[in-house]
């Protein structure tokens, strides 16, 4: 990867505008080699080194806590900017921004202050909750056992997205009584092995495979609770869903850019066209008009959903429990509806870029299919059919059970 992107000095003040501008500069750098690196599955370690140096992960930290005070709309925009170059990159930041949202909205206790300092330094957080081979999804077999004044962690996690690029990891476990618990530990600790064994057809460079935890020492202050059903936890759940959609939206914009580049630099007119060049071909023009319209709709819907989540975040500062609850339900609905429709539009865009060219457009050299593979993989993460049913049930019967779960809504 080229090293021309400038990153700010660590003494420079963090600003919302500065971070978004830096994201654009980095995205342009990442895009230059994206098709080749995906084809060869070259993990983006250099990209994440630059992201850490630029301290992009600080965006949601409020000014009162030493950060730039970016909004959720800003953060979602940052994801789409980075995803335009490579949708793997924003996807791999999902756990980090989930963590910083809790820091942004919750009270700052001593341990949070330590982690807040790490975030402001540019450090990244990731981790894993899911496990493979269990009887049911969500079942946890990783065990945290007491050993004197500390603990030992043993197990194997899956979907450890972004952990290979991060500095700290959060892992779910059960204690010796079988009760759910969590830990947040440095990822360079002895006994942690990050396994590069993710074999998905898309999002191939997110490092979404396994993590082996073998007798890992955990200090008492590194043990955390599991708060998915709390109000902040539910807000973060909806945010995690929109984060996925924004990553896919980045792939949509990347597909549009690659499609235009293909037409201007590689495509020929269709056999029955009267045009001399592909860019003057009316069939190509019509198809590109439809593709760009679909991409515009995807971005517009996601930006609107981000504004809804900003409204939820604002209610936490008010402290009105009823207002918070109303905002949470509304944001969960809007986020689900956004995912349902943008998934259809995004896949359509990624499919139709092949209509801009003939058989040559399928050449591995161009790697245009990565956009479809990435989008399809992102939207396979959570059951869209279930989301659609839950939304319909709400409008017909007022049912909010699943909208309050804090996991996939």
Image: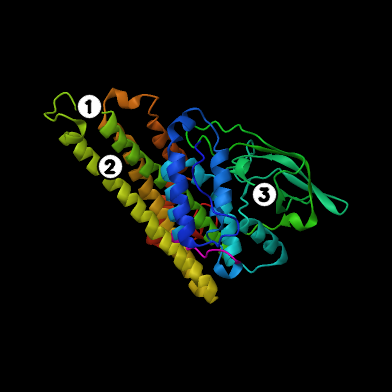
- Residue 234: quarter of image: bottom right
In the image: residue 368, left or right of residue 355: right
Asked if one can make out residue 78 in the rendered structure from this viewpoint, the answer is yes
**Residue found 52% across the figure and 76% down from its top:** 318
Q: Position of residue 72 (x, y in %)?
A: 47, 61
From the image, tell me which residue sits under label 1.
268
Q: CA distance from mark 2 to mark 3?
A: 40 Å
**Residue found 66% across the figure and 67% down from its top:** 108
* Chief secondary structure of the magenta portion: loop
In the image: residue 171, left or right of residue 340: right
Please state which of residues 222 and 386 is positioned toward the viewer in this rendering.
222
Q: Is residue 257 above or below residue 111?
A: above
Q: Earlier in the sequence, mark 2 or mark 1?
A: 1
Q: Are marks 1 and 3 in contact (CB under 8 Å)?
A: no
- Residue 335: quarter of image: bottom left
**Residue found 51% across the figure and 34% down from its top:** 204
Report crowding for label 3: few under 14, some 14 to 19, many 20 or more residues within 10 A (C-alpha). Answer: many
**Between tags 1 and 3, which lies in front?**
1
**Residue found 19% across the figure and 39% down from its top:** 286
From the image, tell me which residue sits under label 2.
291
Q: Earlier in the sequence, mark 1 or mark 3?
A: 3
Q: By what rule are the colours in the image chosen?
A: rainbow
**Numbered circle sitting on residue 168:** 3
Please state which of residues 286 and 69 is positioned toward the viewer in this rendering.
69
* SS at badge 2: helix
Q: Position of residue 298 (x, y in %)?
A: 35, 50
């Amino acid at each position: 990867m080229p090293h021309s992107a400038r990153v700010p000095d660590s003494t420079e003040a963090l600003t919302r505008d500065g971070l978004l501008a830096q994201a654009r500069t980095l995205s342009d750098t990442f895009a230059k080699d994206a098709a080749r690196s995906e084809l060869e599955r070259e993990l983006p370690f250099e990209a994440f080194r630059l992201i850490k140096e630029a301290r992009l992960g600080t965006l949601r930290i409020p000014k009162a806590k030493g950060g730039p005070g970016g909004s959720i709309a800003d953060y979602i925009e940052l994801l789409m900017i980075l995803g335009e170059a490579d949708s793997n990159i924003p996807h791999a930041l999902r756990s980090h921004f989930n963590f910083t949202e809790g820091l942004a909205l919750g009270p700052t206790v001593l341990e949070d202050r330590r982690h807040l300092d790490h975030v402001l330094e540019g450090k990244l957080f990731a981790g894993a909750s899911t496990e493979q081979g269990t009887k049911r999804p969500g079942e946890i077999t990783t065990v945290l056992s007491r050993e004197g004044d500390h603990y030992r962690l043993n197990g194997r996690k899956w979907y450890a997205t972004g952990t290979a690029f991060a500095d700290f990891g959060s892992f779910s476990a059960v204690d010796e009584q079988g009760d759910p618990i969590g830990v947040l530990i440095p990822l360079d600790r002895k006994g942690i092995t990050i396994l590069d064994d993710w074999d998905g057809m898309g999002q191939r460079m997110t490092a979404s495979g396994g993590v082996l935890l073998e007798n890992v020492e955990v200090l008492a202050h590194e043990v955390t609770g599991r708060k998915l059903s709390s109000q902040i936890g539910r807000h973060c759940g909806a945010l995690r869903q929109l984060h996925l959609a924004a990553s896919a939206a980045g792939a949509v914009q990347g597909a549009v850019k690659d499609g235009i580049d293909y037409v201007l630099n590689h495509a020929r007119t269709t056999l029955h066209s009267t045009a001399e060049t592909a860019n003057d071909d009316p069939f190509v023009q019509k198809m590109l008009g439809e593709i760009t319209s679909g991409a515009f709709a995807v971005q517009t819907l996601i930006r609107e959903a981000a504004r809804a989540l900003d409204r939820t975040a604002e209610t936490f500062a008010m402290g009105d429990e009823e207002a918070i609850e109303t905002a949470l339900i509304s944001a969960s609905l809007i986020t689900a509806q956004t995912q349902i429709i943008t998934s259809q539009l995004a896949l359509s865009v990624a499919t139709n870029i092949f209509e801009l060219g003939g058989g040559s457009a399928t050449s591995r050299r161009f790697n245009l299919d990565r956009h479809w593979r990435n989008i399809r993989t992102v939207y396979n993460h959570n059951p869209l059919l279930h989301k659609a049913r839950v939304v319909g049930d709400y409008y017909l019967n007022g049912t909010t059970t699943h909208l309050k779960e804090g996991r996939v809504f």
